[in-house]
Image (tube, rainbow, N blue to C red):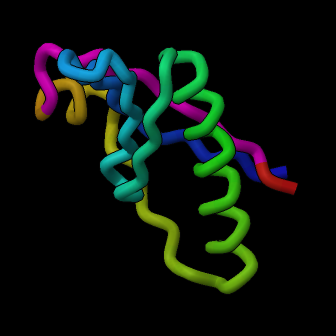
Amino acid sequence: MPKYTYPIIFILNEETKHHNGYIPDLATFAEGPTPEEVYADMEEILKNYMSLAVKYEAEIPTPSTLESIAKKWPGYKVSLITAEIK
């Protein structure tokens, strides 16, 4: 089963206290009350994105490096997220 790993940025909205997750390479976004919920939602989004890309033979963007994303988004938590598709 193929695995896909991309950098994810976590952003806290100070006004609403909601957490946001963003995968810039795929322009995907999720929002939730906790970072854990956002991470779980983003795993599902990544899994669905990749499943559809494979199914329809769409181009899959090359992931940026964790370092390059962290450099572009200083002050934000940057991590990696992986999805495995069947």
Vertical placement of residue 23 versus 58, above or below: above
Q: Nearer the viewer, residue 12 or 56?
A: 12
**Does the magenta portion include 83?**
yes
**Residue at x-position 25% and y-position 26%:** 67
Task: Tell me which corner region of the image, top left, top right, bottom left or bottom right, holds residue 10.
Answer: top left
Quadrant location of the C terminus? Answer: bottom right
Residue 80 drawn at (x, y percent): 48, 27
Q: In the figure, is residue 56 to the left or right of 72? A: right
Q: How many marks?
A: 0
Q: Main secondary structure of the magenta part?
A: strand
Vertical placement of residue 85 versus 51, above or below: above
Q: Nearer the viewer, residue 41 or 66?
A: 41
**Residue at x-position 42% and y-position 53%:** 28
Q: In the figure, is residue 52 to the left or right of 58? A: right
**Does the magenta portion include 74?**
yes
Q: Which residues are magenta?
A: 73-84
Q: Nearer the viewer, residue 49 or 84?
A: 49
Residue furthest out toward the bottom: 56
Q: In the figure, is residue 20 to the left or right of 5? A: left
Residue 57 drawn at (x, y percent): 65, 84
Residue 71 drawn at (x, y percent): 13, 27
Vertical placement of residue 80 versus 61, above or below: above
Task: Tell me which corner region of the image, top left, top right, bottom left or bottom right, holds residue 8.
Answer: top left
Residue 18 drawn at (x, y percent): 37, 22
**Residue at x-position 35% and y-position 57%:** 27
**Residue at x-position 33% and y-position 22%:** 78
Vertical placement of residue 47 versus 83, above or below: below
